[in-house]
Image: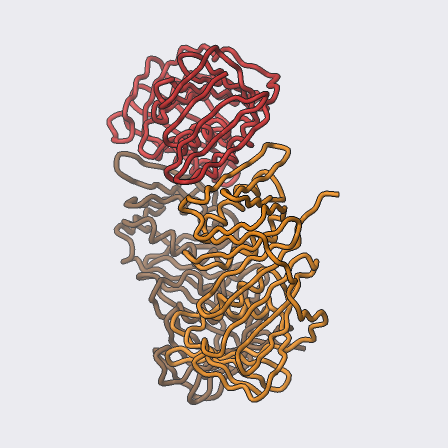
Chain colours: A brown, B red, C orange
């Protein structure tokens, strides 16, 4: 039994959006200290890890930890209908989740069936990254878009003094160089050269929910999974993406 | 023989839009007192009744009543090309309708073939409604959109003190309650509880042309057709929609 | 060997857009006095002739004339990713074209493969036009859109005192008359009545890149190709379109 309240329902919508970009179902772990969710995309190439502390809610009543499996797309559809100024109460009622949107003089209740989530995910990949890069979301989104016009893959290469992005397709090649001292990189720490190639479609979905002007954190190591994370208010979303390696 | 003039051609475009949302052809009755049209949609589940008084025109020359059958989609396509500030003259010429758009220093003439409209409609369904509800168009559009995310049908339920909207689908359930005293309901008269379910696609098309901020009138009676009507300037559009009843 | 620089990369994007609207590949002639391109669309119904003088570039280093065949769609895709405030350097490197976008603190390099352009075009059709009409782009775009709602073809008819546009389809007819003295025609010189019909889809693509508020020049002669041209900054784009003649 739990009852959670969020003063700004649109904020919760944005959080769920960051999850549904990658996975279609997931198991929320509702614990004393907050809500979390770990899930892999259907192809198991990527993973999402979401965490939102109890303090992000205006009411947080959780008697004991509970696992709530939900179809994320259905949840996201309902949240897409949030009106300005609405608050949201989330409760469990018999094997269902009740979402109650409270506006001025009207309330709207949705009941969502809980589902069994088979593929549970416990652990994040443990990688010691050789390069840690921080940059604002928009330029990273731009690079991903640039590359997607000529290829389905993008390569990131961090060396002592620059961060290089490249892509290569039938129609041409792209190479973008970002100097360490440039205005683009908020942080740039390279212990060892790191170089890996990733699927652009997944990357696009991972950066999509980054709030405007927010900083994205990138962990990179040669031919190891990429880590990409950013905050959405008090919540933290972290993605992992397996590298693409040509055979 | 008739000649009608409308100072603001875009106004006539909006009127025709409210008809074409539901029917693809119709017979305009052009009479001394004004223009009217009654038509059923191809599936005969819904009906539209449109009326525009002579005073809505800046020129209204009608020698004797005439029936003008038109393909509403072709008419609507032509009207979609109206420019700001244009006036419109409508005339009959041989078996055709001439639409003349008059702007600054240019005029544009369209000729539309009249058609035989087989299925003529004379009468509106006569229902004594148990509930009469008035609300601004936008929140009603929102409810219809909410429901369409989880179902193809929506139920309206008016009882003494509240107006309830609900929908139920495979992914979940929606229930929205609107108190009589809430700011949403401009008028709420219930003689007897009324409860019926309707097809959402038809409803969407019926509310589409409601001018921003205008009030929609709803007549409801258990398992009887819904009546939904609103004004577009001096014109009045009224829709009827048969209830959906599970077998 | 050449190196060209354009201070505003978006300007070059707009120029290339005017070419790619009609042709999918083309041979740029890079000469001392400037860049030019002549190409026919794949169906050989229309032709585009583009010219941009050396002075439109902030750097224009051309040792000797060169022909550069490019896939225009690939070029256009790359240019679509131009950011505000970027300048562009265009250079040849081995059998490739290097496009370097230079922004604040970052640079992005694209390499595009040069291609063999088989169908080279040397000459523009030589027609002595009977009517020369000038009008701002927007009303011409509107006429083309009007006509496309009822037909795939449009007729232009210039006589001593008016410019008529007409179209005829199954659903109706359109006729728009523009008086010589009207505000629409910036210039209207008719030596002899001229009347011809053209494919609307081609025309739509030809007017698409006309900058807002710019004047389009039309050359018309009965059943001869149409000439349509306008400036994009210092560059000049000219299209020719064969008339449509019913058999």
Residue C47, quarter of the rendered image:
bottom right
Q: Residue furthest right?
A: C247
Q: Is residue B186 visible?
A: yes
Locate residue C103, reporting x and y percent. 40, 77
Locate residue C55, reporting x and y percent. 45, 78
Q: Is residue A175 visible?
A: no
* Left or right of residue A65: residue C27: right
Q: Residue at x 63, y 47 (%)?
A: C196
Q: Is residue B122 above or below residue A97?
A: above
Q: Nearer the viewer, residue B197 or C246?
A: C246
Locate residue A25, reporting x and y percent. 51, 53
* Left or right of residue A243: residue A92: left
The quadrant of the rendering that contains the C terminus of chain C is top right
The quadrant of the rendering that contains the N terminus of chain C is bottom right
Q: Residue at x 42, y 86 (%)?
A: A190
Residue B191, quarter of the rendered image:
top left
Q: Residue furthest front?
A: C191
Q: Nearer the viewer, residue A28 or B25?
A: B25
Q: Is residue B226 above or below residue C229?
A: above
Locate residue C13, reporting x and y percent. 49, 68
Task: Give the tally of numbered discs.
Answer: 0
Q: Nearer the viewer, residue B12 or A8?
A: B12
């Amino acid at each position: 039994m739990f009852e959670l309240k969020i003063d700004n329902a649109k904020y919760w919508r944005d959080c769920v959006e960051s999850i549904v970009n990658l996975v279609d179902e997931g198991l929320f772990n509702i614990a004393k200290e907050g809500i979390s969710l770990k899930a892999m995309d259907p192809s198991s190439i990527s993973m999402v890890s979401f965490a939102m502390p109890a303090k992000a809610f205006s009411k947080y009543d959780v008697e004991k930890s509970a696992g709530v499996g939900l179809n994320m797309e259905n949840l996201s559809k309902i949240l897409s209908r949030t009106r300005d100024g609405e608050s949201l109460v989330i409760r469990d009622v018999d094997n269902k989740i009740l979402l109650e949107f409270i506006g001025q003089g009207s309330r709207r209740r949705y009941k969502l069936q809980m589902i069994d989530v088979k593929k549970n995910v416990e652990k994040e990949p443990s990688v010691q990254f050789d390069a840690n890069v921080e940059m604002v979301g928009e330029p990273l989104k731009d690079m991903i878009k640039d590359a997607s016009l000529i290829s389905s893959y993008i390569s990131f290469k961090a060396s002592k003094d620059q961060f290089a992005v490249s892509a290569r397709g039938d129609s041409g090649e792209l190479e973008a160089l970002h100097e360490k001292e440039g205005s683009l990189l908020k942080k740039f720490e390279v212990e060892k050269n790191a170089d890996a190639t990733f699927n652009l479609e997944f990357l696009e979905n991972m950066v999509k929910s980054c709030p405007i002007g927010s900083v994205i954190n990138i962990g990179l190591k040669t031919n190891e999974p990429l880590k990409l994370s950013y905050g959405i208010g008090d919540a933290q979303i972290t993605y992992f993406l397996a590298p693409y390696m040509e055979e």
